[in-house]
Image: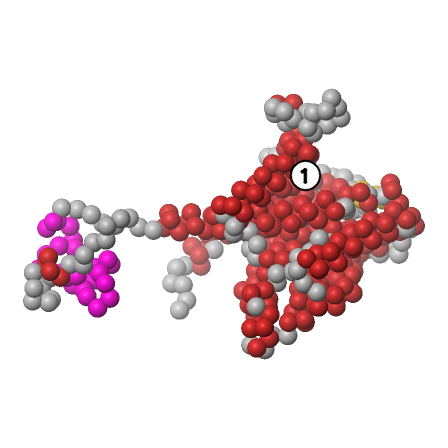
Amino acid sequence: MSDPRPLLLRRGPLLLTALLLCAPPFYLDAFWLRIGLFSMAAAIGAVGLGLLSGTAGQLSLGHAFFLAVGAYGYVWLAGEPGPGLPPAVAAVLAVLLAGAAGGLFSPVAGRVKGIYLGVATLALVFLGHHVLLTADSVTGGFNGRSVPPLELGGFAFAESGPELTVLGVPFGAEERLWYLGLALFAVTWFTARGLLRGRPGRALAAVRDSETAAAVMGVHVARYRSAAFVVSSMYAGLAGVLLALSFRRVVPDYFSLALSVDYLAMIVIGGLGSVAGATAGAVFVTALPLLMTRYADQLPLVAAPGSGGGSIGPTEASRYLYGAAIVVILLYAPDGLHGLARRIRARLRRRPPVTGPPGTGPSSGPDRTDPDPDAPSGTTGTTGTTGTDDTSARAKEHTP
């Protein structure tokens, strides 16, 4: 049955959210826009890892490797030395390159599971880091490479493009990249939700719950697990492209094991198998160290970067905090922030029982025929319908 509400009313919250997300470039400075850009890039990668680990039930510690493939793939394809392709074409090919890397590893992902798959993907991080350091002609070695700006139809998402002023606000690189990040995140959001709500999502959930039962129902277990790995790799490649554009320079040390652990923390805190949960976890894990770095001098027990003296730096302090958040989530809300928000909404929507003195209100009177919500099955809890008085027909109240 279709929703009888008008289309504008049904899509109102979505439209309001879109308008609110379009407003920050007009009011916030570059620091807050950079936090938003890094959070959107992390959310894209976290959604991909959520599909793999939360929905398909495959543990992966190699997400940083596929982020590096996307970032460095774009830099090499669009830059010099390299083919020097148009940046838009290079971005698409970088995402496909990350998917191809996931496809090369997918036979392993289709046959190995659990901690064994985690160890196998862990090898990708160390192998990739070694290649990034030694392949100087492609990656630039230890110092990395500068990132060519993205251009679409002559419009550059960088300071080097023509000056742009919108409603009296000058649009620099952060303001322009903000809307690119929003567009990429919107594509990620809707495609991932479509996968989860469609047949692939149900098949992956069946594989996660019981491979034997899924195989009996006709699900090709190895094929779906391999496909989940490829799709997750493509999301990671897209996140790598956006990260490269936001950082404007890529270095090998960023794509380390710590980054893979950060992404696991994102989906655990936000909620496994949830697009909204992965997004919330990504924003939390990404924004926390940046905020603590900016306000380190105002926080107790946290020292500004480079101050020394044995104090805890903002990066270490933020890791301690979201490590503690993981422990609290696992103990009190195993389904993450998304599940916690869902339960809170359910409680708020629950109507309190209607109470009042006998003989008053619209529910009283001899012609009452409404069923009693507390009555057991097979009774109505009404007066004037059973031939007995009201006290004998009313359901017995349970003692709390």
> In the rendered view of the protein, which quadrant contains the N terminus?
bottom left
Judged from the image, the secondary structure of the residue bearing numbered disc 1 is helix
As drawn, the residue found furthest toward the front would be: 116
- Residue 340 in the image: state x and y as whole percent: 47, 48
Q: Report the residue marked by disc 1.
A: 34
Instruction: Check disc 1: other Cα within 10 Å, few if <14, some if 14-19, many if 20+.
Output: many
Q: Could you tell me which residue is drawn at 57 percent across and 68 percent down?
A: 210
Magenta-drawn segment? 358-382
Relative to the observer, which residue lies in front, 316 or 156? 316
| Magenta highlight on residue 322 | no
Residue at x-position 78% and y-position 55%: 124
Q: Main secondary structure of the magenta part?
A: loop
Image coordinates of residue 170 in percent, x first then y, are: 68, 36
Q: Is residue 22 above or below residue 226?
A: above
Q: Is residue 372 magenta?
A: yes
Frontmost residue, 177 versus 230 = 230
The image position of residue 173, as x and y in percent, is 72, 40
